[in-house]
Amino acid sequence: MALLLLPTLVMAQSAKERQQKADTLKQLRSQITTLTRDLQKARGEESQLARSLRKTERAIDQISRDMRLIEGRQQRESKTLSRLKQELSGHQQQLQQQQTRLRHQLRSAYVMGQQGQIKLLLNQQEPATVGRMMVYYDYISRARSREIENMRESLTALQQVEQQITQRLAEIDRLKQEADRKQLALQSERAERKETLKRLKAEITSSDRQLVSYKKNEKQLELLLKALDQALADIPERDTRPFNKRKGKLSWPTKGRLAARFGTQRPVGNLTWRGVLIDSKEGSTVNSISQGRVAYADWLRGFGLLIIIDHGGGYMSLYGHNRSLFKEAGDWVETGDSIASVGDSGGQDRPGLYFEIRHKGKPINPVRWCRRVRNNRTG
C-alpha cells in the first residue's frame, strides 16, 4: 500500500513546491512594484517632461514586444504554409498516379471484357475455365472500385489542404497588416519621444543642472539596488557556479565599441563612469553575462529601460538604455539568454548599452570581469 501511495505523495509534493515558487515570484514582483512606486514618489521634483519621456519609452518597449511576437507568429505561419504546399504537391502527384492507373485498368477491362465474353460462349463445355474467368473479372472490378475510392479520398484531402493554405495566407496577410499598424504606432511614439527629448534638454540649460541631474540619477539607482538587495535576501539561490569564479571569463552582453570606460571622467562635473557605455546598433540583442534572476525590469530615469540581474553572492549586473525588455522581474535566466534589445531610452542621443557589474552595491570594473577587449571593441 505504501508503494502505491508513493507516486501520489511525490506528485502532491511537486505541486506544492511549484505553488510555493509561484507565490514567491508573485511576492517578489509585488515588492519590486511597490519600491519602484516609492522611489517615484520620493522624486516629486521630477518634471512633467521626464514623466512624458518615461511614458513614451515604455510605449515603445510594449510596441516592440508586440512586433517581436507578431514576427514570431509570421515565421510559424510561413513554416506551416511551406509544409502545406509540400503536402499539396504530394496529393497532386498521388492523384495523377491514381488517374493514370485507373485509365489503364479501364482500358484493360474493356479489351479483356470484349474478348472474355466470346471465350465464355465458346468454352461453355469447360465449367472450370468459366469459373476462373468470372473470378478474374470480379478481381478487376473490385480493384477498379478501390482505385476510384482512393481517388475520391485523395481529392478530398487535396481540397482540405487547399482550404488550409487559403486560411494560412489570410492569417499571414492579417499579421502583416497588424505589423504595419504597429510600425506606424512605433514611428509615432518615436517622433513624440524625439520632441519630448528636445524640450527636456532645453529644460537643462546649464552644466550645474546637468550635474545635479546625474547625481540624482545615481542616487536613485543606489536606493533601488539597496531595496532590491533587501527584497531578494530571503529568496534561496540556485545551485550554480559561483559568479566570482568566472572573473575574466564572462562574455560581453553585446557587441560594439567602448564609448566610455569604467572610472573615466564624465562630460559634466567631477563624476566618473561607474560602468561602461557600449556603442551598438539599435535593436542588437543584449545577453545575460551569467546565470541569475531578474531583479528589476522597468524604466528608471537616467537609465531608461533597465534590467538588473542578481547573480547571487552579492553580485548584480545592470543593463540600461534598452529599446525593449524581453524578461520580467522574477524570471530566471541562463548565461547568454536574450534579455533585451539595444536602444536609446532614458534620453540618449544615439543607441548604446550602459553596462555595470556591482558587488554588494559597489561598482566594479566590467573590463576586468569580461573577456579581453580588442581594438576597443567588445564581443
Image: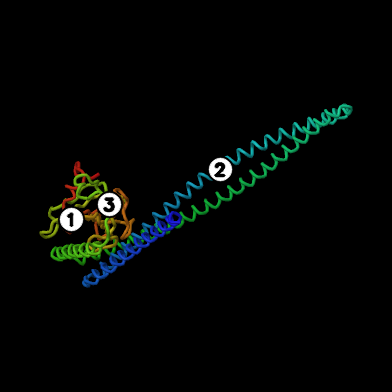
Position in image of residue 341 (x %, y %): 31, 53
Q: Is residue 91 above or below residue 341?
A: above
| Residue type pointed to by label 1 | His
Residue 123: quadrant of the picture: top right
Numbered circle sitting on residue 87: 2
Between residue 161 and residue 137, name the one nearer to us: 137
Dot 1 alpha-carbon crowd within 10 angstroms: few under 14, some 14 to 19, many 20 or more = some
Where residue 42 appears, x then y in whole percent?
A: 21, 71
> Quick check: 86 left or right of 353?
right
Q: Return the x and y of residue 152 as percentages of the image width and height.
A: 67, 44
The one of 197 and 367 positioned closer to us in this rendering: 367
Q: Nearer the viewer, mark 1 or mark 2?
A: 1
- Residue 331: mark in rendering: none
The type of residue carrying mark 3 is Asp
User: Mark 3 sits on what residue?
Assistant: 239
- Answer with left or right where residue 181 lies relative to residue 280: right
Say which element carries label 3. loop
Task: From the viewer's side, name the closer residue of 339 and 273.
Answer: 339
Q: Is residue 166 left or right of residue 244?
A: right
Residue type indicated by callout 2: Glu
What kind of element bears circle 2?
helix
Name the residue that disc number 1 marks. Answer: 359
